[in-house]
Image (cartoon, rainbow, N blue to C red):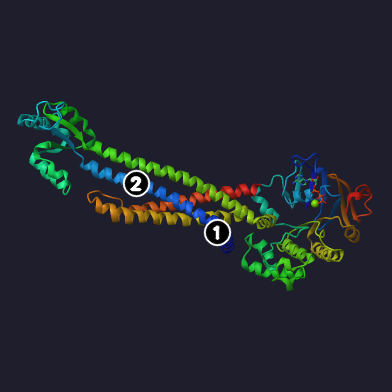
Amino acid sequence: MIRIDNVTKHYNGAARAALESVTLEIEKGDFVFLVGASGSGKSSLMRLMLREDVPNSGSVYVLGENLKRLPNRRVPYFRRKVGMVFQDFRLLPNKTVAQNVAFSLEVIGKSQGFIQAAVPDVLELVGLAHKAGNLPGELSGGEQQRVALARAIVNKPAILLADEPTGNLDPATSEDIMRLIERINAAGTTVVMATHDRAIVDRLQKRVVVLSHGQIISDERETGYSFTPANQNTNEDDN
Amino acid sequence: MRLGFVFGEVGQGLRRNASMVISIVLVTLVSLTFVGTALLLQLQIGQMKSYWYERAQVAVYLCTDTSPSASCPQGEASIDVQKLVEQKLKSDLISPYIDRFYFEDHKQAYDNFQKQFKGNTIAKYVTPAQLNQTFWVKLKDPTQSPIITQSFTGVAGVEEVRDQRSYLDQIFAILNAASLASIGVAALMLFSATLLISTTIRLSALSRRRELGIMRLVGASNFYIQLPFILEGVVAATIGSILASAAVWAVVHFFVRGYLATVLPFTSFVGDNQAFMVAPVLIGAGIVLAAVASGVAIRRYLKI
Ligand SMILES: Nc1ncnc2c1ncn2[C@@H]1O[C@H](COP(=O)(O)OP(=O)(O)OP(=O)(O)O)[C@@H](O)[C@H]1O
Ligand SMILES: [Mg+2]
C-alpha cells in the first residue's frame, strides 16, 4: 500500500536532512502512528506520501504508484485516492459545512447528483448532519475537524493521512475524533497519523513508528507511546 | 467538467477584483483601439492607392511667359514645341507604353482651375496665360513613368515633367507614418495590458489561496484549477476588445463617413464594412493576449 524505500529528504538551505535513509512499509488496512519530537520529520514523511514533495534519494510507492516517476499532470488523480487532514482543519470560512465538503467534490468534477447523495451521507457518518448549514466559524474545534475528516473521506480514499488531527483539541474531543478515525480504519481505510498525544497512542495500541532526527528508531506493532523503548531518549522535548 | 462551478468561480473572481478588472477593460480598450486605427489606416492607404494610382497621370508641362527662366529661357512654348511633344508621344518608341494622352490648352487649364478653386481668392487673380499648357499622359503601367520623365525633361519648351504619383507617395508616406505611430502606441499599451493582467491574476490567486490549497489537496486537476483564472482575464479583455471594436466603428461611422467623406467628396474612404472586418481581429487578439498572459501568470503563481 505504502512503501518508503531508503528515503532521504534534505530541504534546500537546511543544515541537516529532514529524513535520512527512512525505510517503511505499510499494509492495506494498517493503522500507524508516527511519533517523535518536534522537527523529527513526521510531516515531511507525510508530504512525501501525498506527493507534495519528492525525496532527494530513495523511492516512495503509494497505491502501486512510484511517486518519483509520477508525472505532474497525474498527481491530482493520485491525490483523489488519498485523504488528508491537518491540525488546523483548513476549511473555507465563507462556505457552510455542506458546501465545504461539496467543494472538494466539485473541483474534481463530480456530478451534482453524486454530490447531493454523498455529502449528506458523509456528514451523517461524522455526526454533523444537523450542522450542515452552519459556517465553520459557528462550530467547535472538534466539529470543524469532523468536517475536515468528512471532506477527506467523502471520495472514499484508500488511505487517510492525518497530521496531528487532535493537536488543537481538548482530550475529550480528541477521543471523539479518534473514535471516528478508528471507524474509518475499521471500514478498510489505511490510516497514517502523526501525533504528540501519548494518551491516544497508549489507548489504541496500534503500530507505532518513532522518528528521531529524521530516522526511524523504533517500529513496533500493538504498542503504546511510553512502551516504545527507544523513545526514552526523545521524549524530553515533547509537549 | 462542471461549467456552472467554473463560471461561479470566475464571477467571484471578477467581483472581488472589480477595480483591477475595470482597469484591464480600459487598457485593452485603449490599446486595441490604437491597433484598430492602425489597421484601418492601412486599409485606407491600400484603398486610396488602388484608386489614385489607377487614375494617376504623368503631366508634361509646357513653358509659359511666367515660368522660371532657368528651365524656360525662351518664354511661352511655341506651337512647334507642342507638335514635337505630340509626335514623340505617338512615336513607336514611346506609344506602346501609353494608354492614352490628351492636350490641355490655356483655356481648358483656366476652366479647370476655376472649377477646382471655386470661391478661393486665388481664382480671381490667376489668368489663363499663367497656367501651363499640359500633355496629360496615362500610362498602361503607372510604374513606368520614368520613360516619359526621361524623354521630355530638358526638352526646350518643356518646363517640367511630373508624375502625379510623386504627390500621392508623399500623402501615403504621411498616412503610413501615422499608422506606424499608432502601432507603436498600441504595442506599448498592449505591453502594459499584459502586465496588468498578470498582476490582476496573481492578486486574484492570492485572494483565493485557501481555496487553491484545498483544491490541490483534494486532487483538482491543474486545468480545473487554472481555468477560472484564465477565464477571468479573458472575460475582462473580451469586454475591452468589444468596446474597442465599437470605438473603431464609431470613428469610421461618425468621423470618417459622417465628416471626412462630406468634406472630401472625391476621396474613397473606409466604411462600416472595413470596421466590421477589423472587429474580429481585435477581439481575437484581445482573447489570445489575455489567455496567454493570465495562463502564464497563474502557472507561475502555482509553482511557488
Ligand atoms: N519547507 C521546508 N523547508 C525547509 N525546511 C523544512 C521545511 N519543512 C520542514 N523543514 C525542516 O525539516 C525538519 C522536519 O520537519 P517536520 O515538519 O517534518 O517535523 P515534524 O516532525 O512534523 O515536527 P512537528 O511535530 O513540530 O510538526 C525540521 O528541521 C524542519 O525545520
Ligand atoms: Mg509536523
Q: Is residue B122 left or right of residue A97?
A: left
Pick the front one: B154 or B110: B110
Q: Is residue B268 left or right of residue A62?
A: left
Tell me the subunit letter for badge 1. Answer: B
Q: Earlier in the sequence, mark 1 or mark 2?
A: 1
Instruction: Classify the position of the C terminus of chain A by image quarter.
Output: bottom right
Report the amino acid beneath label 1. Ala
- Estimate how packed mark 1 is, as few (under 14), some (14 to 19) or many (20 or more) residues with alpha carbons within 10 Å: some
Relative image position of residue A144 (x, y in whole percent):
76, 65
Tell me the subunit letter for badge 2. Answer: B
Q: Is residue A196 visible?
A: yes
For image coordinates 25% across by 54% down, the residue present is: B262
Q: Is residue B93 left or right of residue B17?
A: left
> Residue A126 got which mark?
none
The answer for how far apart the CA atoms under marks 1 and 2 are is 34 Å
Q: Are marks 1 and 2 in contact (CB under 8 Å)?
A: no
Q: Is residue B1 visible?
A: no
Pick the front one: A33 or B71: B71
Which quadrant of the view contains residue B154? Answer: top left
Which quadrant of the view contains residue A5? Answer: top right
Label 1 vs label 2, nearer the camera: 1
Q: Are marks 1 and 2 on the same chain?
A: yes
Asked if B104 appears above or below A156 in the picture, the reply is above
The secondary structure type at the circle numbered 2 is helix
Report the amino acid beneath label 2. Leu
Q: Which residue is mark 1?
A: B18
The secondary structure type at the circle numbered 1 is helix
Relative image position of residue B143 (x, y in whole percent):
24, 35
Asked if A63 appears above or below B138 in the picture, the reply is below
Q: Which residue is mark 2?
A: B41
